[in-house]
Image (cartoon, rainbow, N blue to C red):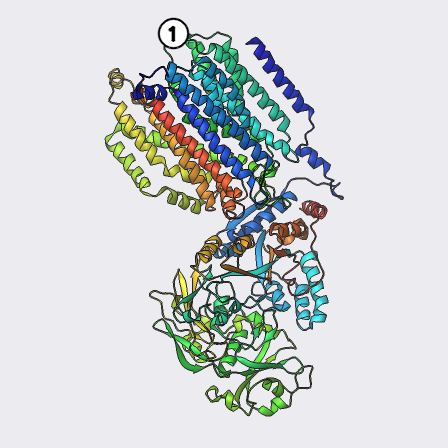
Amino acid sequence: MQKKMRLVALLFVSLAVLLSACKLTTKNDVNEASPTPAGTEAAVDNNPVDIELLGMSSNEADLNIVRDQLNKNGFNVKLNIQPDYGSFKTQEDAGNFDISMSGWTTVTGNPDYAVRSLFKTGGDYSKLSDPEIDELIEKASTQTPDQYKETYKTFEEKLVFEKAYIAPLYRSLKSQAFNQEVLNKDSVRLSKSRSLPWEALDFNDTSKRETEALVLQSTMPTLTSLDPIKGNDGSINIINTNSNVRVVNLTDDDKVTSEGSLSLNHAIAEGNSEYYFILRDDINFARVENKAAVDSGERVGADDVIFSLLRAKDKNSVPDHRTYTLHEHIQNVELVTDLASLEALNVSGSSETVKAALENGLPSKISELVSDKKQASNKDGKYQVVKLTTTKPFPQVLNYLAHQSAGIVSQKQVQAINTYDVAKFDVNKDIPYGDQNTVTEGAQYNNTLYASGPYILAYKNDYEAVFFKNPGYMKGTENEPKIKSIKVRFIKDADSTLAALRSGEIHLYYGVSENKFDVVKGDSKLSLQTVPSNAVSYLLFNTSNRPVAKSVDLRKAVLYAINQDEILAFYGGNKFKAVSTLSPLVDTGLELKADAGKVKEFLNAYKASK
Amino acid sequence: MKNVSLTKQEMNFRLKSNPEYGQASFAGLISLALAVLLLWNAYSPADGSFKAVGLGAGIAFGLFGLLQLAVWYLIRTNLIRHAAIGKATRGLGFLLLPSLFTGNVFVASTAFHLVKKKKYAAYTLAVYSFMTTVLVFGVTALNLFKPYVANGFLSGMTLLLIAGFIQLIALLLIAKYGGEAVIPRWMAIVAIALLATAATGNLFSLFLSLMLFAKLRNRGFTSGSRFGDVFERLSRSSTSMLGLLFVTFLLTLSITSLITFDYGLAIDNNYSAILQSPTAEYPLGTDNYGRDLFSRIVFGARISLIVGFLTTLIPLLIGGLLGALSGYYGKRTDNLIMRALDVLYAVPAILLAIAIIAAFGAGTVNLIIALSVSSIPTYARTMRANVLQVSTLEYVQAARAFGSNDWIILFKHILPNSVAPMIVQSTLTIGSAVISTSSLSFLGLGVEPHIPEWGNILKLGSAYLETHSFTAIYPGLAIILLVLSFNFLGDGLRDALDPKLD
């Protein structure tokens, strides 16, 4: 026993000696080894600065990365994670945050939209009020692409690097996955800005068009409003785009086109302030009867266009108007009946007359301009032409007209429903056109929608929304909707959505997250489409009641703590660098580089100023 | 064969009544199963090669498993021929002992049993306390492969070494003297040293040291304490001891990780090491933020254990007290308390927890409260039933006849004799508490997402189940093992505490 004990003791002692002899790198060694950034001699104190980060649980990954990066740079991050957009917005409106995780998608594809409602004083989503910023936004809006590049560069320098109103994170890919065994691969479009055109979608087996429903997905069962001007968010953008036709559309790469729109052609007259649209005569409004779509017999015409665009620009046309800033450049919209006036005018930057431009490619030339939409007959040369004037030369207005908020509604129907006085609108009593309760199954169901687009929403519940094709939409053309019925299923959770797609419960999943790309690619019956989008994620600073509102130093410290390279690494290269919401649209050549030294510097300046 | 006359029943009885026989087959088979699993895991079908670490571990498990089965065969023939295990066979146990250093606790614990012919609780406890320290030391040593280690790593490892050394000495001394009714007085030093090593969280050391102190005080005057009896019986059940081993292992790891593990590796993102497969540097791989899963699971054990223990302890105390009062006083008190608790019982536990968290916000404290409240009624019911039964016993009547005050009767005479089922119940519910904690975190209602908690880790991993399955498998395994351990322990405790089995 004694001998054994001695042996054991010897073994242990030698092991201990061995262990202590080997050189181990401890955490302190590592920290000491890393060089301290210059300019930190005047260390005020090393206590971390408290900062509250607000976000939604769907952005958990971004929140975690930002938290990590801020923590590593001398902040103490308090996370405020809200389960859905509603609670998030409530927190944001209440000012319960220092920085909030925000995102923006420029759905119109023009740079003005990427800044106007976000950063201009009084903008729909703006929490900023800075005259210099306003001035730059206005200046750039009147400029041509070559000119505005410089202006937007100055704008970004001011917004991001000088004032640090936002801290950019990344620019995203737009992605969608669909079941290629069910859907015809060539019929599924993925555009940079515009929403998926439903009328193009088709089954592989065309005999199923009438019998089977195509099933799409959305996360939000509560639709903001089906009146296109009263909402501009993820719950309705795709729905309203397909429910209401517009006078122009965007191509997949954000060029303005008349294809698939209410206009046959459009032209910009010299001076860039007058815009002409020649309307087609083969779209009727659809309405819902007994939960099925029927042709209302009412044609979509110039009066509806004029009515729709004028109410879009008028802040007081409806209560809770969410999109008037997009259309504030519209001065007037009117009917053109004098054919001679079109001949007298040239197209901007060309010697072609407006009439020629509008007639371009049409089977029958313009013989007469009619004021009554019922009399329009394109094959007989009887057309309706609408003229839009802007408050100043502003070619980007066309992009706004391609936005869902410029969707054409029925003048007759909207006026019949919206009988309330806007100034005295009572939420509890008055039911506005497009109120989501009127299309939700239940006691309040009373679908009064008139849809000018390819599909009309028949009814919805918390499980799904059911759409039917508009029987009077461009019949006999390639734009006639193929599939009779489309269902949008409400599935909140991304993983469940992907599971639903893979099991065949839904056919198309728009917005697949980057970390699921591998899974989609690995499934032979699925097809994945991606395209760099106009979506930018950024951190928005509180501008009212927190230290970050007053201290530029603190904001800049946060700004320089953000390391976009790390974010890109996290997403496996499926995100791109961004400087502001303009980044997808204008290449200003600026780049945000993380700088731990600057963070220290600004933090010390902030602490000193306290 | 000599014993041709041996009937099948006799043979069966000989084999079944021998604990070593059953243990040997269990350890051998499970080692081989694990060996297959390890080898399969280490095999990469792409290039037909094996990962070195997995291959080594698989071979080690396989070899010891085969050796164990050989020993099992020897035991079998020994038992059939001589009705006892031969000295040579027991000697083979020493060959199996090194399996401890490969992490094979099954073979090691069996070997420790095999080499000792006369077994007693103190010996088993000493074995397990030493095994725990060796395992913790081994697991902690994996940190050596990291680019850097925690600042307290070296001192922590030295302390673990010292603790292991003390426990080994204690094991050898107890193997020599521990079986006797009266142990030498100088064993007090061993007991004190063991108590010191219990500071690492080693429950076996703690119980062993208490047992030694009891023996020293007792000096052979009585037949032993109830505590000693319970352990004597518990130590005979190898599944519950393995359960307790895993719980103690996690507890020790949680406590020692305070100085031997670096928290930064568990919560700081490392964008250059995203979703790495298991390697020496990252033994369980990394998650989608490049955080070391191994460190995260080790730190996650702390939260799971704390929340698990507290959510069992709080209702145990509150429910126990309420149950005791209503059982003792009966009538209106009983009705009042129990009906109120019935109302609470009618609300589904997980819904109640979700409601509480939704109302007061997510966080560890709220999580503990939420999970505690809902299990108060079950404890109260158990306690009430026990108290009702015990308060009719003669010694309680006697105490009443003496005119003792109610509180003294309740706390001195009734409660100590009614806690046994409560202990069993708590070990069984602690497992479900761990699951509830993880479920709530998984649903995003527990602790903040970046904090390493098993449910959180599993949630992140579940998104990569198809592409990087290890991110979900390891935290899932940890949860399963902990819950299973508590259940095994609970089962064993129930048997050990059951007076009918005396």
Three-letter code for the amino acid on which mark 1 is drawn:
Phe
Q: Is residue B491 visible?
A: yes
With A213 as the anchor, is A587 left or right in this view?
Answer: right
Residue A251 spot, x, y in % from top left: 58, 72
Q: Quadrant of residue A44?
A: top right
Between A293 and A332, the residue placed more toward the observer is A293
Residue A259 spot, x, y in % from top left: 56, 77
Between B360 and B185, the residue placed more toward the observer is B185
Q: Quadrant of residue B145?
A: top right
Residue A443 spot, x, y in % from top left: 33, 66
Residue at 40% over, 46% down: B355
Q: Badge 1 is on which residue?
A: B221
Which residue occupies the extreme front position in the image? B1
Quarter of the picture containing the N terminus of chain A is: top right
Q: Is residue B445 visible?
A: no
Above or below — where is A128 with respect to A391?
above
Q: Residues within 10 Å of mark 1 (few under 14, many from 20)?
A: few
With B455 as the anchor, is A567 left or right in this view?
Answer: right
With A393 as the anchor, is B164 left or right in this view?
Answer: left
Between A329 and A474, the residue placed more toward the observer is A474
Above or below — where is A540 with respect to B82?
below
